[in-house]
Image (cartoon, helix red, strand yellow):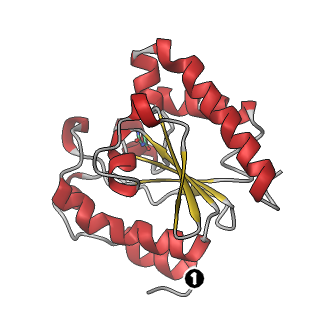
Amino acid sequence: MYTNWEELKQECMLCNKCELGKTRTNLVFGKGNENAEVMFIGEGPGENEDLQGEPFVGRSGKLLDSMLACIDLDRNKNIYIANMVKCRPPKNRDPLPAEQDICINWLREQVRLMRPKIIVCLGRISAQRLISPDFKVTQQHGQFIDKKGTLFMGTFHPAALLRNPNNKPAAFDDFMALRDKINEICERTY
Ligand code: URA
């Protein structure tokens, strides 16, 4: 258990608890406002993120930033972005359950220190791990689920939207619903 972000980050940056630590260029701890009320959680770093040490900086990150901007959210101001695993899985394969089991402890500490009101799961990997194991993004996206006082919502992963732009309108609807929910329950975001 960590008492502050500085301590947590310092320790996490040295992590070698799983095989992914051996092949990473940079560990991607997370980015944003550590006092945010809204946290976004993706899957894991890709090539660009591994090279730059920041989440969602490639093509899918650009799309994510533009969707965030539509509802006045900005990783440099009022949200925080993290991933299920902090090191890039080789060839961008899905992180293995064992890798997630180890890495989720860092994420738990981030959530514990931040105490976000809303957690948005970007894509299947984080939604199935954090909301429910049988979560179907295409069927359950945009629904808010209360878990011990924190609201969770799953939506499309931006990389999936790049592959299948037909889902963009549905994803934008989810972001509009998110904006409404923030207006309803958050005090410092807008
Ligand atoms: N995809 C993710 O899930 N996370 C990133 O940080 C980049 C791409």
Query: Which of these two is toward me, 23 or 41?
Result: 41
Q: Residue at x 40, y 78 (%)?
A: 11
Determine whether 2 is above or below 5 in the image: below
Q: Position of residue 120 (x, y in %)?
A: 54, 48
Query: Which of these two is toward me, 104 or 119?
Result: 119
Three-letter amino acid code at the position of disc 1:
Asn
Q: Position of residue 142 (x, y in %)?
A: 55, 37
> Left or right: where does residue 143 sit relative to residue 21?
right
> Left or right: where does residue 142 sit relative to residue 104?
right
Query: Which of these two is toward me, 128 or 50?
Result: 128
Q: How many marks?
A: 1
Query: Which of these two is toward me, 69 or 134?
Result: 134
Determine whether 172 is above or below 121 in the image: above
> Left or right: where does residue 182 sit relative to residue 102?
right
> Left or right: where does residue 53 sit relative to residue 186?
left
Q: Within 10 angstroms of label 1, few (less than 14), some, or many (20 or more) residues?
A: few
Q: Position of residue 171 (x, y in %)?
A: 56, 27
Question: Quick one: SS at disc 1?
Answer: loop
Q: Position of residue 116 (x, y in %)?
A: 62, 64
Residue 13 sits in quarter: bottom left
Q: Which residue is mark 1?
A: 4
Q: Residue at x 20, y 42 (%)?
A: 90
Q: Residue at x 31, y 65 (%)?
A: 103
- Work out which quarter of the rendered image holds the N terminus and state it: bottom left
Q: Residue at x 49, y 49 (%)?
A: 54
Determine whether 171 is above or below 105 in the image: above
Residue 187 sits in quarter: bottom right
